[in-house]
Amino acid sequence: MEPNKESENRSKKFKEILLPKNSASLDYFRKLGIADALIDAYLEAFAMFDKNQDGIVSLKEIESLFINLDERFSLSDISEIVKEADKSKKDGIDFVEFVEILHTFLAKCTTTQLDEYLMQAFHRFDLDGNGTISWQDLKGVMIKLGQPITDAEAKQMIKIADKKNIGAINMQEFIALMKE
Ligand SMILES: [Ca+2]
Ligand SMILES: [Ca+2]
């Protein structure tokens, strides 16, 4: 089996474990008004954090991801958020708690704030700082995140968002993509 296919299967399996079809969590998310597409995006984000795939994002896992991103962050802030969200007292956050954090955060966010966050995220993806996200930028970021992708995968992902057909993603396209 190609390595790509293998990791795809692994992530599919992981999703099934985290969110079995017709699970109570799925009903709960829908009740909160979260679109299914967004739940998928949350699952992908969760999988990125939960490196050892035990269904819990521990403080250590959050920390290591942020360190890879060279983020200047306060660990005490994060541990505060995790402690507050960790209702099930698993010493980390499970998927439901993870979604609750993001959902609450997004609900509190004004459109302007959200745009600002997305602009910051854009600059983080634009590794060479030339104002657009190329497939090389994207590939570099994914390596930093410990989720390496192939050239073909990076090109494909850029192509999907590249509505203006400039061979890269500009800020408007990026913001539009993230809000989809
Ligand atoms: Ca974990
Ligand atoms: Ca760039």
Image (spheres, helix red, strand yellow):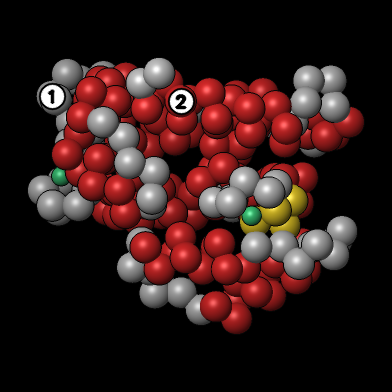
56 w.r.t. 64: above or below: above
Tally of numbered discs: 2
- The picture places residue 38, in percent across and down from the top left corner, at 60, 31
Q: Is residue 13 left or right of residue 118?
A: right
Task: Give amino acid for label 2.
Answer: Glu
Task: Write the residue at 55% across / 78% down.
Answer: 75
- Residue indicated by mark 1: 166
Q: Quadrant of residue 3?
A: top left
- Residue indicated by mark 2: 6
Q: Are marks 1 and 2 in contact (CB under 8 Å)?
A: no
- The picture places residue 174, in percent across and down from the top left corner, at 33, 36
Q: Quadrant of residue 46?
A: top right
Task: Give amino acid for label 1.
Answer: Ile
Ligand 2 within 8 angstroms of badge 1 C-beta: no
Q: Secondary structure at mark 2?
A: helix
Q: Distance from label 1 to label 2 (Cα)?
A: 32 Å
Task: Write the residue at 46% across / 60% down.
Answer: 65
Looking at the rendered image, the quarter that the N terminus falls into is top left
Q: Nearer the viewer, residue 76 or 4?
A: 4
Task: Write the residue at 46% across / 25% down.
Answer: 6
- The picture places residue 136, in percent across and down from the top left corner, at 17, 39
Badge 1: few (under 14), some or many (20 or more) residues near its Cα, within 10 Å? few
Ligand 1 within 8 angstroms of badge 2 C-beta: no
